[in-house]
Amino acid sequence: VPNFWYDISSVTHADCLTLAFRNLPLDRIMYGSDLPSDLRRGNMLSFGQGWEQLGEEDIAALNIKHCDPRPTYTVYETLRALRRAMKFEDFGPNEIDAVFSRNAVKFVSGK
């Protein structure tokens, strides 16, 4: 679809981002955040056709003992997944700038 743009806010799975980078036009993918919900500590859990955000209280209820289970902000989880996917796809400064800045400028300006 020629007028579709893709906002990858709150995507915390590097595999999903890798698929997007491989199968969607890179000049239509934009980083974004879902504030204020991305400032909640937790992570997004995907299953079947849906998803749910696991927050601090949900993770604490799992009673994890083998590691420090305290989550960070969802926005940081998104950035970590983006870094992994971009590294996996061997993105350089040009591709990174496109996703984090240039594509949004293009979208807003209509050019």
Image: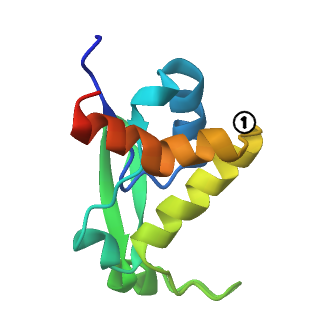
Residue drawn at 34 percent across, 44 percent down: 105
Q: In which quarter of the image is the N terminus?
A: top left
Residue closer to the observer: 69 or 19: 19
Residue closer to the observer: 67 or 26: 26
Amino acid on which the number 1 mark rests in the picture: Glu
Residue 63 placed where, x, y %?
A: 51, 86
Above-or-below relation of 27 to 90? above
Q: How crowded is mark 1: few (under 14 residues within 10 Å), some or many (20 or more)?
A: few
| Quadrant of residue 102 within the rendered picture | top left
Q: How many marks?
A: 1
- Disc 1 on helix, strand or loop? loop
Name the residue furthest top: 1
The scheme the figure's colours follow is: rainbow
In the displayed structure, does residue 48 sit left or right of residue 93?
left
Residue drawn at 33 percent across, 60 percent down: 33
Residue 32: in sight, yes or no? yes
Q: In which quarter of the image is the C terminus?
A: top left
Residue 40 placed where, x, y %?
A: 32, 78
Residue drawn at 30 percent across, 29 percent down: 5
Above-or-below relation of 90 to 28? below
In the displayed structure, does residue 95 sit left or right of residue 92?
left
Residue 49 placed where, x, y %?
A: 31, 34
Above-or-below relation of 15 to 43? above
Residue closer to the observer: 66 or 27: 27
Residue carrying label 1: 89
Residue 7: in sight, yes or no? no
Residue 81 placed where, x, y %?
A: 58, 55
Residue drawn at 41 percent across, 70 percent down: 74
